[in-house]
């Protein structure tokens, strides 16, 4: 409950900085932008200096909550979704959710099948 109460836009702080990934991204960016050797070396040194001085932020979630979120993410039997009419988070069974969605979409009184040869938006754009 505590982990989900943080909301769907919650992002846990990093547990470690991926120095290798950052250096690789900087090298790729330098190559794409065709920087000369002097500019490229200055940029590399600046990035390394920032990485050496950087510290991880304080954790904004406890280990048990992080484990809970990871378990929910890996569990394909449940979906974590925003509630329809409130700012809440709900957990639903995947099969039940898919069945309800299919029932809604098959309701011909509410929805009408659109075929690719009949493109209603094409005429609206003209």
Image (cartoon, rainbow, N blue to C red):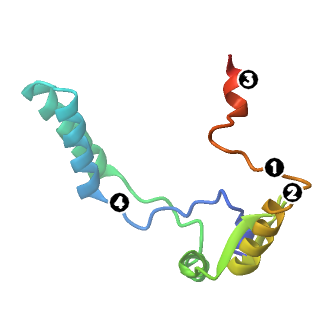
Q: Nearer the viewer, residue 80 or 13?
A: 80
Q: Nearer the viewer, mark 3 or mark 1?
A: 1
For the residues carrying marks 1 and 4, which lies nearer the camera in this image?
1
Q: Outermost residue toward the front?
A: 117
Give residue 114's position: percent from left, percent from top. 72, 45
Say whether residue 102 is left or right of residue 27. right
Residue 88 placed where, x, y %?
82, 64
The residue positioned 22% from the left and 49% from the top of the image is 24
Judging depth in this view, the residue of 122 and 7 nearest the camera is 122
Query: In the image, which disc is placed on residue 17?
Result: 4
Sequence-earlier tag: 3 or 4:
4
Q: CA distance from mark 3 to mark 4?
A: 49 Å
Q: Which label belongs to residue 124? A: 3
Residue 53 makes an appearance in the image? yes
Rate crowding at label 1 as few (under 14), some (14 to 19) or many (20 or more) other CA atoms within 10 Å: few
Asked whether the viewer can see residue 91, the reply is no
User: Mark 2 or mark 3, which has the lower sequence index?
Assistant: 2
Q: Earlier in the sequence, mark 3 or mark 1?
A: 1
């Amino acid at each position: 409950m505590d982990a989900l109460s943080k909301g769907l836009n919650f992002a846990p702080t990093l547990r470690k900085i991926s120095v290798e990934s950052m250096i690789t991204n900087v090298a790729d960016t330098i190559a794409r932008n065709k920087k000369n050797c002097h500019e490229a070396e200055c940029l590399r040194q600046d990035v390394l200096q920032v990485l050496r001085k950087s510290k991880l932020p304080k954790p904004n979630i406890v280990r048990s909550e992080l484990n809970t979120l990871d378990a929910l993410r890996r569990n394909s039997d449940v979906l974590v979704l925003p509630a329809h009419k409130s700012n809440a988070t709900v957990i639903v069974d995947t099969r039940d959710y898919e069945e309800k969605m299919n029932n809604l979409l098959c309701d011909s009184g509410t929805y009408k099948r659109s075929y690719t040869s009949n493109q209603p938006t094409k005429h609206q754009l003209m």
